[in-house]
Image (tube, rainbow, N blue to C red):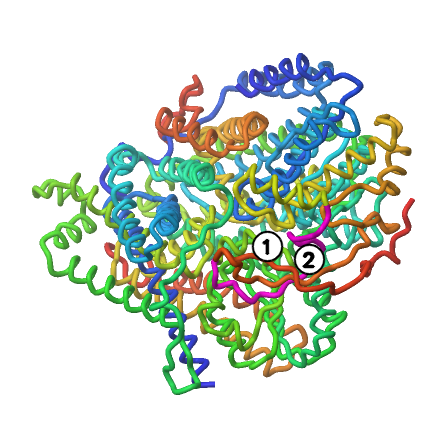
Amino acid sequence: MSEPLPQPEKSATPLGTGLPSPWAALAIAILLAAYPLVMNALGQTFYIGLGSRVLILALAASALNLALGYGGMVSLGHAAFLGAGAYTAAILAGLGMNQAWVVLPSAFAAAAVLAGLTGAISLRTRGVYFIMITLAFAQLFYYLAVSLPSLGGDDGLPLTERSKLPGLRLENDLSFYYFVLGTAALVFFLLYRLVSSRFGRALVATRENERRMAAIGYPVFRIKLLAYTLSGGIAGLAGGLLANLSMGVTPHTLTWHQSGILLVMTILGGSGYFWGGLTGAAIFLVLEETISAYTEHWNLALGLLLLFIVLAAPNGVMSFTGFRRGEKA
Amino acid sequence: MLPLILEQTLNGLQYGLMLFLLAAGLTLVFGIMDLINLAHGSLYMIGAFIAAALFQQFQNFYLAVVLSILLTALLGALLERVLYRRLQTMSHLSQVLATFALILVANESIKIAFGGQPLSIELPASLSGTVNLMGEDLQYPLYRLLIIAVGLAVAIGLYVLVNKTRMGMWLRAGTSDRVMAATMGIRIQPLFTFIFALGAGLCALAGALLGPLLAVSVGMGEAILIPAFEVIVIGGIGSMRGALVGALLVGMIDSLGRLAMTGLLKSFAVSGAATLGATLASMLVSLLMVAVLFFRPSGLFPARD
Amino acid sequence: MFKKLTLAACFSTLVTGAFAADSVKVGMMTTLSGPGASLGIDIRDGFNLAMKHLNKKLGGLAAEIIVADDAQNPETAKQISERFIKKDKVDIATGIVFSNIMLAVGPAFFGAETFYISANAGPSQYAGAQCNPWFFNVAWQNDNLHEAMGKYMQDKGIKKAVLLAPNYPGGNDAISGVKLYYKGVVAEEIRTKMGQMDYAAEIAQIRADNAEALYIFLPGGMGVNFLKQYAQSGLMKKTPVFAPGFSADEDTVRGVGPAMEGVYNTSHWYREMENPVNKKFVADFQKEYGRLPTLFASQGYDAALLMDAAIKQAGGKLENKAALRKALETVKAPSTRGDYSFGPNHYPVQSYYLREVVKNADGTVGNKYVGKVADRLVDAYVSQCKMQ
């Protein structure tokens, strides 16, 4: 499977860097900023917490999108990075360190280091072999977390209080939402700069034709490894936020099921589209929340809906929208 | 010590051969149809549930196994015609999403049909009990020997099918270059339906045979999906020989490894040896996969380079 | 789409969300999908049966039961707890099967001053240092059934035993629970992989150990897998199996089949218990659902009976939380297991019994009462509890 089959219509993701217009970004920012105020006014504070969860998983899915959509690296092990960030946050909290400006960068760093190390080995393989080796690494960390009493085993690690930020009480759902939104905005801005940079173009070009990129002198391995490391780091950052939202972390965050959900969110939204991760996370979580409130058999409805979506929009929901894919890089 | 090692070897063989039944279908579907089917484990679950339901209806183990294979193969063929044929032209990512959705649908449908409680399949008296293999030292369950025998028979049958028949020639041609095979006049669509039915039937065989050993319950498919994928990746995707070697390797590492890890640590008198040994043992197969892919990034027997 | 859906959902709740003051809302969050689903389904069905017997009222108040599936996922559970607290505004929550889920969502309920009546999960944390005025458990503390079996094995004079549990803290607790009372030789402590399917390797070790007894703690599908394979190895007679009740209830029997004959297990409840509440429960459960009730179902049933009795005693005034707590602590609620009372940590003080899986006269296989093992057993953590 080292060579793609000669089937041009099977191209995994849309070509180009899928850059959004600044106006779309602004509109999304305004919508997301207004959302909790509307919910608050309606007295539906529950949906503020749900909003935070959507944003956090959108970050994680966007992180995966960087590796998957832009770099063509299908990882079924991103739960490991999400979990690494979450466990880092919980361990630091256990040691009495709960300043957000220390906790979140540490979560990012821990996951990035993990992604860098495992990526250096995983990137020797490609295709389905890459999918499975990333899964294998994630399984290793899952069994480690379940078995080690110092990591709380099956119970995981609780967080007694949320991280602190000078001047903002994160215990409050509304301020936590804005904190998450702020972090997400920063990450999305940096991601935008990244994918539109020379590096981003080189990454997409490597996805499209690695051999040619190597032949004209690009260090393709390092390009992919860097993208994978950053992707892991951002997932770790999301994990740090997730631990804060859920007030703890359990090994469930590390399961292959969680990796699968992140993958599903990204593909659902549209891999390689800038807003693919956000769209996918929002659709998946809202579907899950709405359907499960109505029927015990929500998995059946969710499954059928996903099946319908994939048949109707094979390139993800974003392919329906006006967001144009960019020129071929 | 020797009987224990021999027993574990038999256990590894048995587990490995069962994994082979699943991996064989998976690797054919992947190798020839270029289709990632996460729902392969669901066919295994469906096969086991059909067998259990038939067993409870007729109280006849053999009938339940045979009928379940036929019905599941039929279901597989049907799914291929209705759904997988469309997925096949889509990207790998769409296939992942669609077959993930299919897992949800299969699990919930089984729960609606059979309830959430596990079902049981009982062995006929003639198959239960143990046999003495090394005098009194090694009593081994008769049924596990039977599973080994069936597994070996299927392995030989598949070998003959792939290497000695016209169908096998088409299969091999399809694996190495599908488009070329189609151009050369092999009718590829009926071949796909056949492969899918075969894969589903093998899943049902594994599910029904393991029914008396394992809980027939919702979610059993996912539990075996990962080992099955590990097998085909270790062996090399699309390669039947790779699937067999990979399956036996995973089976052996899993059962002998657990014995060795606990024994080894115990001899060093490490405190908490049981916990540490079990933790390491549960990581062995994942470590094996990482190691194999590190040295052979396309598995042990890549079907095409 | 996200906006539209949530907004639509909001408006629909605005319309239906208004509730009368003379009603009570119970949030039942339990595991209805995935490998652990059979336990949650039993708890829910037991609870629903009680609601039917109580004419859909708790303590005279019209009751609304909101059921949610946590899918054995702590993150999903967390989200449901938020929904229960902020959107549905439940008065009482119940239903969680697994301790790790309980620990993940407990603080949210306690922080919102919502009563949680556990129908299963009984983590040691909430029995000891983290005991909590909002948490009650009608089932048992996790270690109780292990301790009771350790006591039985000790009383029976077993000299050499093998202990087997999955490799996670719950498994460690099980083994230390047994060893608290069992003082004979432990030939081997085997730790298995979580979710393990094939136990041939462990069974080979057990055969080599030549012990008089095997203690297993393997929740859910793992227990079914192990017992099926163990029965076929022909060891059941030589090294009989001892287990906590939740590894040998009627669901496990249904999954394993007749091969399970001869497994001993401890429970705070058995089907033949001679009291009118239990007789009605067992008969109607079979009639309603067409299967035998398990201890999980009895716990779900008892949770509803406790809520009913306590609300009645508190005069139906849910807003007076102190009075309701007092009522929960002191009320003598009817129960399928007969008498039980709460210790200072809100965990039950009750008797434990030995059951054996036997073949009945009609050819079916099920648990049969053998005898009482422990009288009014108190859990090991209560001394660490300083209830506020």
Marks 1 and 2 share the same chain: yes
Foreground of the two, B294 or B268: B268
Residue identifier under label 1: C249
Q: Is residue C276 above or below residue C213?
A: above
Residue identifier under label 2: C267
**Which residue is at 16% across, 40% downward?**
B190
> Does the segment drawn in magenta span residue B196?
no
Tell me residue A271's x, y (percent). 44, 33
Secondary structure of the residue carrying tag 2 is strand
Residue C357 location, quadrant: bottom right
* Side of B158 relative to B97 (left or right): left
Q: Amino acid at mark 2?
A: Ser
Q: Which residues are magenta?
A: C257-275
The C terminus of chain B is located in which quarter? bottom left
Q: In the rendered structure, are the residues bearing label 1 and label 2 in contact, judged by CB atoms less than 8 Å apart?
A: yes
Q: Is residue A160 visible?
A: yes
* Side of B86 relative to B226 (left or right): left
Q: Residues within 10 Å of mark 2 (few under 14, many from 20)?
A: many
CA gap between label 1 and label 2 equals 9 Å
